[in-house]
């Protein structure tokens, strides 16, 4: 895959991605909703070593997930864009918020998580696998 780039709204945080996505998902959980301010989050996962912050330092926020894992949200302290993330349940993997990619046309979400919490006006895709809660392991 060609190198992908992205960043926050104000441009203070920029990142570069080199490898193929591990997976991509729409997440309808309450935490993703709060963190993004959107009705659901679309998240692309990459191997940690494939994602490099090339400008700025994202601020980190840690919170517990209902799975018991600790989730990390990485966002711009200036404009508030949530750019990256990680979870203690997925070591070696870093997530990228799809809206922060400069060109997200390569992203193909395969699954929707926490569909049990999807807002009533949200249309679930026919092209994704649906999970009532988190991704089964
Ligand atoms: Zn910013
Ligand atoms: Zn979520």
Image (cartoon, helix red, strand yellow):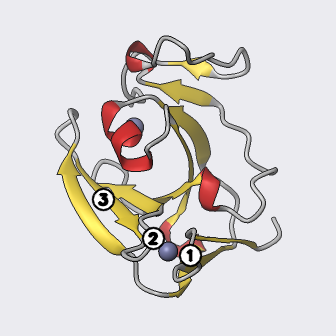
Q: Which image quadrant is residue 73 in?
A: bottom left
Q: Which residue is mark 2?
A: 79
Q: Tag 3's secondary structure?
A: strand
Q: Earlier in the sequence, mark 1 or mark 3?
A: 1
Q: Is residue 97 above or below residue 25?
A: below
Instruction: Choose mark 3 or mark 2, whichever is in front.
Output: 2
From this viewpoint, is residue 93 visible?
no
Could you classify mark 2 by the number of other residues whose Cα lies within 10 Å: few (under 14), some (14-19), or many (20 or more)? Answer: few
The location of residue 77, given as percent across then percent down, is 36, 75
The location of residue 7, given as percent across then percent down, is 60, 72
Q: Which residue is mark 3?
A: 72
Q: Earlier in the sequence, mark 1 or mark 2?
A: 1
The location of residue 81, given as percent across then percent down, is 47, 63
Q: Tag 1's secondary structure?
A: loop
Please give the name of the residue rendered at 39% of the width and 41% of the height, measured from the top-left corner. 32
From this viewpoint, is residue 103 visible?
yes
Q: CA distance from mark 1 to mark 2?
A: 6 Å
Q: Tag 2's secondary structure?
A: loop
Q: Which image quadrant is residue 109 in?
A: top right
Q: CA distance from mark 3 to mark 2?
A: 18 Å
Please give the name of the residue rendered at 30% of the width and 48% of the height, measured from the top-left corner. 89
Q: Which residue is mark 1?
A: 10
The location of residue 22, given as percent across then percent down, is 60, 50
Q: CA distance from mark 1 to mark 3?
A: 21 Å
Please give the name of the residue rendered at 40% of the width and 67% of the height, measured from the top-left corner. 75
Specify whether tag 1 is near ligand 1 (CB below 8 Å): yes
Specify whether tag 3 is near ligand 2 (CB below 8 Å): no
């Amino acid at each position: 895959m060609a190198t992908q780039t992205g960043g926050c709204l104000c441009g203070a945080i920029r990142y570069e991605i080199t490898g193929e996505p591990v997976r991509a998902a729409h997440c309808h959980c309450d935490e993703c909703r709060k963190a993004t301010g959107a009705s659901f989050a679309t998240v692309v996962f990459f191997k940690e070593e494939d994602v490099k912050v090339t400008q700025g330092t994202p601020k980190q926020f840690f919170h517990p997930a209902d799975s018991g894992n600790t989730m990390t949200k990485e966002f711009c302290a200036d404009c508030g864009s949530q750019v990256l993330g990680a979870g203690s349940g997925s070591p070696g993997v870093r997530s990228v918020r799809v809206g922060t990619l400069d060109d997200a046309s390569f992203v193909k979400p395969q699954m929707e998580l926490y569909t049990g919490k999807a807002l009533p006006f949200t249309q679930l895709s026919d092209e994704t696998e649906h999970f009532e809660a988190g991704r089964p392991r």
